[in-house]
Image (cartoon, rainbow, N blue to C red):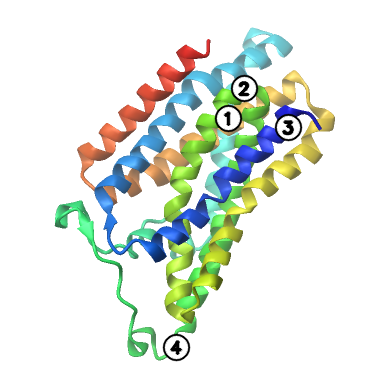
């Protein structure tokens, strides 16, 4: 196994295990700065949108037009892009809305105020038994199902990070960092309800961490299944799908969540900053 494959696995693991950082954040930080979280999520969306449209989709088109010719390759690029969107959208549809980490209430409900309330929110209080129907098992179940839902969503993200790193390590680093940022609130969404239901920090942290392990699992399966058939056509189709997945995540999850946490302009400033940084980094490594 060469160094590029090891780097790809390492970056994918880094991105996935950021859910554990979210769990630690929920336990260790007494007050959550939602303005910072909003800007960070906007920044992550900006990185992912810019790199998807400017770099990943362009590489997919180059590979596919080189393999099949100009017109068929262009059609294949567009088809693979929307196939990636359809894949992640179907995953969203099959996960119940109340347990879906891409639905705002699962994360925002853990931080009930927003930047408009004063920018700093206290941690959510432990619910009384009667507010949970005298049964904390409901909270526990919410955390476990959220962990499963996040694991399902993280699988294609791991494949995206792995594939991008194999093709261009600097691109893989940027994608891994962007995905890691948006995995932090997902770790919070898993850890907090499990901790409130059980009082066990270790158990809550482990479930959050395990939900992120789907990303390196996606990389492993991608390596085992796709590498024997890797060709310009497979690479182009896969990269087109990766671009679609990342665009959908940015538009469906990151930007709406960033706006929910903070001010509209703060979210947009973060997104523009992410685009600008990504643009400069790509120019520096030309």
Disc nearer the start of the sequence (3/4):
3
Q: CA distance from mark 3 to mark 2?
A: 11 Å
Looking at marks 4 and 2 on the same chain, the residue that comes earlier in the sequence is marked by 4
Residue 28 falls in which quadrant of the image? bottom left
- Taking depth in this image into account, of 73 and 59 the one nearest to the observer is 59
Crowd band around label 4 with a 10 angstrom C-alpha radius: few (<14), some (14–19), many (20+) = few
Instruction: Pick the residue in front: 50 or 4.
Output: 4
What element does badge 4 sit on? loop
Residues under numbered marks 2 and 1 in contact, where contact means CB atoms less than 8 Å apart: yes
Whichever of labels 3 and 2 marks the residue nearer the N terminus, that label is: 3
What separation in Å lies between label 2 and label 1 (alpha carbons)? 6 Å
**Which residue is denoted by mark 1 in the rendering?**
172
Callout 2: 10 Å neighbours few (<14), some, many (20+)?
few
| Numbered badge on residue 168 | 2
Rendered location of residue 135, percent (x, y): 44, 88
Callout in the foreground (4, 2): 2
Query: Mark 1 or mark 3: which comes first in sequence?
Result: 3
Dot 1, how many residues are within 10 Å of its Cα: few (below 14), some (14-19), or many (20+)? many
Answer left or right for 281 relative to 128.
right
């Amino acid at each position: 196994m060469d160094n590029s494959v090891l780097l790809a696995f390492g970056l994918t693991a880094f991105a996935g295990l950021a859910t554990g950082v979210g769990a630690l954040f929920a336990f260790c930080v007494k007050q959550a700065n939602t303005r910072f979280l909003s800007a960070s999520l906007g920044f992550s969306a900006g990185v992912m949108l810019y790199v998807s449209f400017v770099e990943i989709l362009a590489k997919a088109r180059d590979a596919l037009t080189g393999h099949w010719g100009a017109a068929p390759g262009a059609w294949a690029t567009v088809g693979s892009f929307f196939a990636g969107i359809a894949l992640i959208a179907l995953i969203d549809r099959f996960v119940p809305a109340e347990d879906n980490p891409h639905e705002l209430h699962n994360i925002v409900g853990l931080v009930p105020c927003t930047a408009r309330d004063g920018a700093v929110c206290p941690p959510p209080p432990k619910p009384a038994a009667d507010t949970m129907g005298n049964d904390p098992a409901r909270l526990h179940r919410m955390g476990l199902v959220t962990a499963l839902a996040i694991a399902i969503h993280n699988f294609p993200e791991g494949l995206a990070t792995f594939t991008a790193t194999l093709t261009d390590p600097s691109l893989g680093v940027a994608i891994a960092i962007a995905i890691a940022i948006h995995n932090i609130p997902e770790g919070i969404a898993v850890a907090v309800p499990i901790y409130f239901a059980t009082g066990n920090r270790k158990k809550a942290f482990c479930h959050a961490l395990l939900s992120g392990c789907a990303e390196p699992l996606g990389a492993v399966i991608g390596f085992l299944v796709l590498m024997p058939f890797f060709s310009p056509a497979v690479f182009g189709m896969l990269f087109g799908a990766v671009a679609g997945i990342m665009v959908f995540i940015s538009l469906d999850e990151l930007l709406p969540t960033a706006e929910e946490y903070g001010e509209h302009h703060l979210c947009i400033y973060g997104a523009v900053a992410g685009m600008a940084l990504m643009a400069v980094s790509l120019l520096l490594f030309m």
